[in-house]
Image: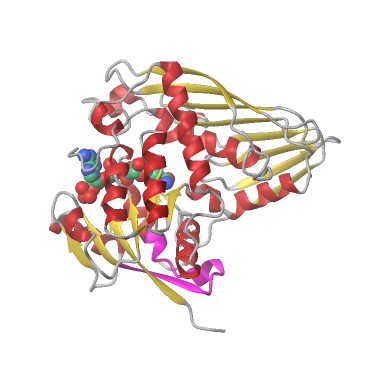
């Protein structure tokens, strides 16, 4: 077998998820059975200072010769970077991704891809014209659990899906947790609110089960009815959004299908950390697939057939294992020793695409990312939620 090819990453931003992603990225791929590629980190940039970027590189265990930058502009000029991972707040994704694409860098950009569909469309257009790889970092799509669930659907195990119910909500107690309203979860200047941060995962399950599993030539955009509850302390950010979707399908495909996707910063899918209820329910005439564990980091499934027989399956997240002394995690919760967070699978997909010349992710292409942004635009339109023009704009460069 030929030796593994190494893909060289640059990390743009040094916050919470940048750190978690990069630690996963640097986890030996053979621990998850991936032998044909490797990842390395050659640079990281902080918008605040070079010293912060240095500290970040140390924190994540990057190679000692990785370069630290105190500005994103200087960082994208580094000729050794094959692909940039963008982990700024969503308000900044359009400007940051454009900066990278203009510098001829491939891009993996955190969710929500952009603030609106027009920005996503523009990025896709630039990436295509420059023949660069571009993918929204919806890591969940690349989990073996997600691959398994999609396979169960396409094999007809539960019949044509009739309904999906999907929630991604966290009782964050926003007034207490974000008292000055500046945090990205509630700050309109940073495209705050539940929808773009958490709701995207509720929609991810709806789309990856109901839309992505249909033949490309026949799948159609859904109709939408949405309700948005505003977070009053900051005015222009949703504390809760509820979406009802109808996916048109031919009679042979089972006819129209429905979905309910919900998200909230006020109440939780797992109240008090009780993980015993399904976070996603995928229902068909022959049975139901239930997904357990947060919609963004699912860990097990149950398939219940019409006779009541239950088949359970666990999908533990690999890593260097017990005794390694290595820990990863996000948002104040560490995984157990040696267990990855699960972000390496999307990184493997991006690296594999670069090695093989693909320009999009296989399980979430640009058209689908754009369509989901269109749905979220429509949710905001129906709910009267508008962000400041400077983060909705297509003008590049715009100083944020
Ligand atoms: N996939 C997931 O599971 C997951 C989880 C959480 C978040 N996310 C996504 O990742 C993105 C970042 O989230 P996060 O939780 O990592 O946020 P965070 O901890 O607040 O970090 C964001 C980073 O962006 C940079 N930044 C640049 N301009 C900024 C500005 N004006 N305000 C704040 N930060 C600014 C900062 O790093 P430097 O200035 O040092 O570069 C900051 O540390 C969001 O789009 C979010 O939706 C994804």
Toward the right, the furthest residue is 307
Q: Is residue 267 visible?
A: no
Residue 146 x, y percent position in the rendering: 61, 49
Residue 39 is a magenta residue: yes
| Of 151 and 128, the residue lying toward us | 128
Magenta span:
23-41
For image coordinates 62% across by 43% down, the residue present is: 212
The magenta stretch spans residue 240: no
Q: Residue 141 placed where, x, y %?
A: 54, 49
Report the coloring of the rendering.
Answer: secondary structure
Please, is residue 114 above or below residue 239 in the view?
below
The C terminus sits in image quarter:
top left
Which one is in front, 315 or 168?
Answer: 168
Within the image, what quadrant is residue 282 found in?
A: top right
- Look at the image and tell me in which quarter the N terminus lies: bottom right
Is residue 44 rendered to the left or right of residue 150?
left
Mark count: 0
Pick whichever, 141 or 377, lies toward us. 377
For the point 48% across and 42% down, which residue is it?
369
Query: Dividing the picture into quarters, in which one does residue 228 lie?
Result: top left
Q: Residue at x 20, y 54 (%)?
A: 72
Is residue 379 found left or right of 40 in the rendered image?
Answer: right
The one nearer the camera, 131 or 58, is 131
Q: Is residue 327 visible?
A: yes
- Left or right: 209 as drawn, with respect to 126: right
- Quadrant location of ligand 1? top left
Q: Position of residue 392 (x, y in %)?
A: 30, 31
Q: Which residue shows up at 51% across the image and 36% down it?
A: 371
Question: Where residue 255 appears, x then y in whole percent?
Answer: 75, 29
Q: Quadrant of residue 76?
A: bottom left
């Amino acid at each position: 077998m030929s030796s593994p090819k190494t893909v060289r990453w640059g990390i743009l931003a040094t916050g919470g998820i940048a750190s978690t992603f990069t630690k996963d990225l640097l986890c030996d791929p053979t621990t998850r059975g991936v032998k044909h590629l490797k990842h390395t980190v050659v640079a990281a940039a902080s918008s605040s200072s070079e010293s912060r970027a240095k500290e970040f590189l140390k924190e994540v265990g990057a190679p000692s010769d990785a370069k630290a930058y105190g500005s994103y502009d200087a960082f994208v000029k580094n000729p050794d970077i094959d692909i940039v991972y963008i982990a700024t707040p969503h308000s900044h994704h359009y400007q940051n991704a454009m900066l990278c694409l203009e510098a001829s860098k491939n891009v993996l950009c955190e969710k929500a891809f952009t603030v609106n569909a027009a920005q996503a469309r523009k990025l896709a257009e630039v990436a295509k014209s420059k023949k660069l790889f571009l993918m929204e970092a919806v890591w969940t799509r690349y989990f073996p659990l997600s691959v398994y669930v999609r396979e169960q659907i396409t094999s007809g195990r539960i019949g044509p899906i009739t309904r999906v119910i999907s929630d991604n909500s966290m009782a964050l107690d926003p007034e207490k947790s974000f008292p000055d309203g500046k945090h990205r979860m509630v700050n309109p200047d940073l495209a705050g609110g539940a929808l773009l941060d958490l709701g995207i995962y509720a929609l991810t399950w709806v789309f990856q089960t109901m839309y992505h599993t249909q033949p490309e030539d026949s799948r159609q955009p859904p109709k939408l009815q949405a309700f948005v509850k505003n977070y009053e302390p900051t005015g222009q950010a949703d504390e809760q959004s509820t979406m009802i979707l109808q996916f048109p399908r031919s009679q042979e495909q089972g006819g129209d299908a429905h979905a309910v996707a919900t998200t909230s910063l006020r109440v939780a899918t797992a109240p008090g950390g009780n993980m015993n209820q399904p976070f996603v329910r995928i229902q068909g005439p022959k049975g139901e697939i239930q997904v357990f564990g947060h919609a963004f980091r699912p860990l097990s499934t149950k398939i219940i057939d019409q006779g009541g027989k239950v088949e359970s399956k666990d999908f533990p997240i690999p890593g260097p294992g017990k005794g390694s002394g290595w820990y990863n995690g996000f948002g104040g919760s560490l995984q157990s020793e040696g267990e990855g967070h699960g972000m390496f699978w999307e990184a493997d997909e991006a690296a594999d695409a670069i090695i093989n010349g693909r320009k999009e992710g296989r399980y979430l292409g640009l058209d689908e990312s754009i369509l989901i942004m269109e749905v979220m635009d429509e949710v905001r339109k129906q709910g009267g939620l508008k962000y400041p023009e400077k983060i909705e704009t297509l003008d590049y460069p715009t100083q944020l």
